Amino acid sequence: MLTSKDTLIDLMDAYKRGVHAALKDLPQEALVWQPDDEANHIAVTIWHLGRVMDSVKAVRMEAADPSEQLWFKEGWAEKYDYDPRGIGDGGTGILTGYSVEEMLAVPVMSAEDMQSYFDQCFQAVYDFLEKSTSESLQENSPGSERKFYFWVKICIIDGTRHTGELLALRSMWERKNK
């Protein structure tokens, strides 16, 4: 019988496959193409997906300082000279609530780095999920009234929604560049 944990793992696997499919063999110019001047592009959307998982895992699930996020610990902030703390909704620096100017200031990572950062963040949440039980996922995360299940679900919902966006942007770019 499937448990809630099994379902979350299945959905996480589908999420990662969808993001990888959207990026497969996509040239650099497609990563930064925007259908209009205020639209997100694929690169910033992938960055957002990583940032959501990174922030959720470190800050929401572990009650750690934002400096403990992989963006900082793994040297991405230094490499791309970008500290997103204090920007956007709640100062989380995950792209949500950014102005167009703030969105355009997010550095465009190389395709390889973009996927690597996404994969690192994905793996952090996935490893937590694999070590959990369906019962432990129903416990509140430290310093929160929200359950671990809720935070993993947020990552999946955001990822599913934005995977559709990635595929739509890719399709629009491909039609425009036939």
Image (cartoon, grey):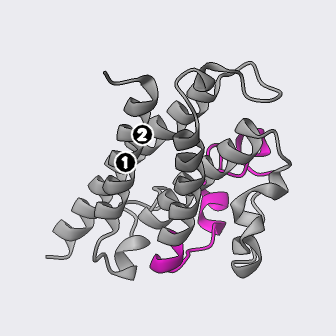
The image position of residue 50, as x and y in percent, is: 56, 56
Q: Quadrant of residue 20?
A: bottom left
Q: CA distance from mark 2 to mark 1?
A: 6 Å
Residue 141 drawn above or below residue 138: below
Around disc 1, counting alpha carbons within 10 Å, would you say few (fewer than 14), some (14 to 19), or many (20 or more)? some
Left or right of 151: which side holds 90? Answer: right
Residue at disc 1, secondary structure: helix
The image position of residue 12, as x and y in percent, is: 41, 44
Kindly identify the residue that appears in the image at 31 percent across and 62 percent down: 22
Question: Which residue was labeled with disc 1?
Answer: 13
The image position of residue 161, as x and y in percent, is: 39, 40
Residue 32 drawn above or below residue 134: below
- Is 13 contained in the magenta span? no
- Nearest the eye: 110 or 128: 128
Q: Say which amino acid is labelled 1.
A: Asp
- Residue 137 — which label? none
Question: Which residue was labeled with disc 2?
Answer: 9
Residue at disc 2, secondary structure: helix
Q: Quadrant of residue 113?
A: bottom right
Visible residue check, residue 95: no
- Nearest the eye: 99 or 147: 147
Q: Say which amino acid is labelled 2.
A: Ile
The quarter of the image holding the C terminus is bottom left
Magenta-colored span = 85-114
Kindly identify the residue that appears in the image at 77 percent across and 77 percent down: 78
Disc 2 + disc 1, Cβ < 8 Å: yes
Visible residue check, residue 117: yes
Kindly identify the residue that appears in the image at 29 percent across and 71 percent down: 24
Left or right of 37: which side holds 102? Answer: right
The image position of residue 17, as x and y in percent, is: 32, 55
Kindly identify the residue that appears in the image at 47 percent across and 69 percent down: 115
